[in-house]
Image (cartoon, rainbow, N blue to C red):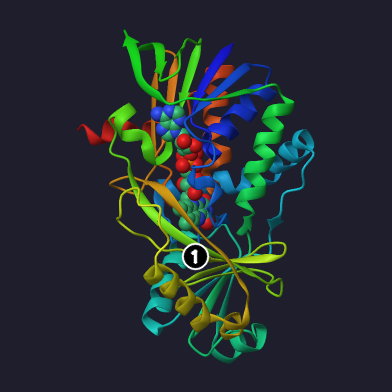
Amino acid sequence: MNILIIGSGVIGLSTAFELALAGHSVKVVTRNYEEGSSWVAGGMLAPYSEGLTGDLLRFSVESLRLYPEFLDRLQEISRLRIYFNRNGILRLFLSEEEYEEAKKLAAKNYKDTEFEELYGEELRKREPLLSGEPIAGLLFKEEGDVDAEKLMDALLFACENLRVKIQVDEVVSLEKRNGRIEIAKGLKENYVADFYVLTTGAWSKPLLDLPVYPVKGQILKVKGSELDKVYYSNISYIIPKENFILIGATSEDAGFDSRPTVGGVRSLLEGAVRIIPSLSEAELLSVKVGFRPGTPDDMPIFDTGENYVVSVGHYRNGILWAPISAKMVLDLVEKGDRSPYFDTFNAGRFSE
Ligand SMILES: Cc1cc2nc3c(=O)[nH]c(=O)nc-3n(C[C@H](O)[C@H](O)[C@H](O)COP(=O)(O)OP(=O)(O)OC[C@H]3O[C@@H](n4cnc5c(N)ncnc54)[C@H](O)[C@@H]3O)c2cc1C
């Protein structure tokens, strides 16, 4: 089948990769493959640390559990190694109240995963780099993180090796008839395919008329390799990679303003040093800005037509949700299997 994917973030490229691997002829059209928020992401795979529940928890855990095989396939085809840390995420709490609430939530919702409660002296003994501020932590052992830049590099390499064509153009409108897309009209040319997948991230509103808006995030890269796991708290995320550490992330309603700001950088540095004081000695390497594709209820948006799928609004968990989002499209195209998540997270919920 000839398949056209619009957008080249982690959602578009993961979908392109899986479809091309299954033997389809895939073309990706993207306005700018470097502007995607996927290049900026912290890469945390954190359904439990994020405190998710209900459908979103099930969706997230399914995707988390697809990760090892997804990365194996991707590393084999791309011939690149992708940093994948599976030492867990330590969710830290700065007050008794916050800790008690999280323990209650975990006891009720997180019965099928292993986590450890670390309190007071026990926490300090196990984690000597921590300041005195966190009073307790929950170590979610199944969680971890990937290097999102490496993941994106590998997706681009794998797509190239599978002969996916990537073309730079902006799709400005979709000509539809009887629930089918007939033409995707670009600024440079028009595109016709058997099947279309729309993965336009935070820029989805003008093309798809869906309630997706940018949530600006600033994130810092500092030098260092002394940490072995992610430290996640309400004041900062400290995310070690192979030879650097990410400190994230602001969450701002600032449209598509791509400027890093003094206030943003200051709040990130302050938050990080309050958790791990020795980070004040780390060399600051860079500040990056990205736009999470936010939605009114913080859930992704899927939609299907006769010959298309919409897969947008992955907000703050698009790296985590990439394997399952790609699999949903693959199963639909290959076997006609329609995942129940197409209904759970259907775009129609906003028109009701
Ligand atoms: C600071 C920060 C930290 C984050 N940390 C995490 C994390 O730790 N874990 C996690 O899971 N997620 C995280 N996220 C969220 C994650 O980055 C996003 O959910 C994910 O990258 C969204 O991927 P996407 O493919 O939908 O969109 P994007 O990566 O933004 O890609 C969209 C692409 O579509 C293209 N496009 C748009 N409109 C058009 C058009 N009309 N025609 C052609 N092309 C078009 C764009 O040029 C772009 O290349 C973070 C995000 C930020 C900003």
| The quadrant where residue 228 appears | bottom right
| The quadrant where residue 10 appears | top right
In this view, 270 is above or below 148? below
Q: Residue at x 67, y 29 (%)?
A: 159
In this view, 206 is above or below 253? above
Q: Amino acid at mark 1?
A: Gly
Q: Is mark 1 within 8 Å of ligand 1?
A: yes
Q: Is residue 340 visible?
A: no
Where is residue 113? Give x, y as percent.
58, 59
Q: Residue at x 71, y 75 (%)?
A: 226
Quadrant that contains the N terminus? top right
Where is residue 157? Give x, y as percent.
71, 34
For label 1, the crowd category at 10 Å Cα-Cα, with few meaning under 14, some 14 to 19 and many 20 or more, is many
Instruction: Assign a secondary structure to mark 1.
Output: strand
- Tag count: 1
In this view, 135 is above or below 66? below
Which residue is labeled 1 in the image?
248
In this view, 110 is above or below 210? below
Where is residue 211? Give x, y as percent.
28, 38
The answer to whether residue 224 is left or right of residue 267 is right
Where is residue 73? Give x, y as percent.
73, 36
Considering depth in this image, is 297 or 238 the residue closer to the camera? 238
Considering depth in this image, is 82 or 335 the residue closer to the camera? 82
Considering depth in this image, is 87 or 273 the residue closer to the camera? 273
Q: Residue at x 59, y 92 (%)?
A: 121
The answer to whether residue 214 is left or right of residue 232 is left
Quadrant that contains the C terminus? top left
Q: Is residue 215 visible?
A: yes
| The quadrant where residue 224 appears | bottom right
